[in-house]
Image (tube, rainbow, N blue to C red):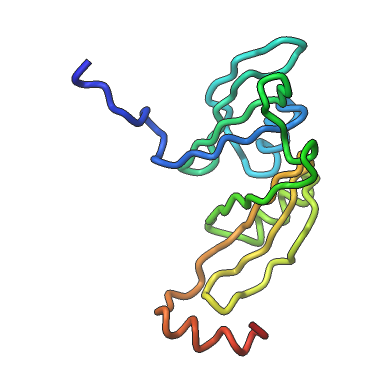
Amino acid sequence: MANISPVPSGFHTLTPHLIVSGAADAVAFYQKAFNAEEVSRMAGPGKKLMHAVIRVGDSLFMLADEFPQWDTRGPQAIGGSPITVHMYVDDADAVFNQAVEAGATVLSPLEDQFWGDRYGKLQDPFGHIWAIATRKEELSQSEILARAPTMGI
């Protein structure tokens, strides 16, 4: 037991665990929108997914269907999500457009931002919010703060 890592292989210290209504459909959406790879799946009652592990880029996240009896509800059941999943990619425009074509809704269009990222926000068909970004400039904190007022902040 001394050789067991406290963090499973492939995971990071923080791992999003998304709850949705229609997890199997969500897996298919993430595959189409973000080129996700399904790593594992555990079926549950009534054709629901108890647990799935999905890889996007170099990161894993977990996904499960809603089970209100266990107090797990997705954003559509609770009136929205206060969480944004932030994803850095090589080409924000390509990923953003691919996700929109797959069925995501644009919340904030892609734009070059004062902090140096090309950045936009989407909502997936299951209620989760995704920020898609590509770093365009490396800026110091003082450079970012100097630019912020010009953006109406």
x then y, percent, for residue 114: 57, 79
Residue name at image x 57 percent, y 54 percent: 86
Quadrant assignment, res 17: top right
Locate the C terminus by quadrant. bottom right
Residue situated in front as seen by the camera: 91 or 3? 3
13 sits left or right of 67 in the view: left
Count the marks: 0
35 on left or right of 145: right
Please state the horizontal and vertical placement of residue 30, each as a whole percent of the image.
Answer: 67, 38
79 above or below 151? above
Q: Is residue 87 left or right of residue 76?
A: left
Residue 3 falls in image quadrant = top left
Measuring 60% from the left and 15% from the top, which residue is drawn there? 42
Instruction: Write the residue at 64% across / 26% down.
Output: 64
Give the quadrant of the N terminus.
Answer: top left
Q: Give the image location of residue 139, x and y in percent.
A: 43, 78
Q: Residue furthest top?
A: 45
Q: Examine the rendered structure and indicate whether residue 53 appears above or below residue 69.
A: below
The structure residue drawn at horizontal position 77% and vertical position 40%, both measured from the top left corner, is 78
Q: Position of residue 58 (x, y in %)?
A: 46, 42
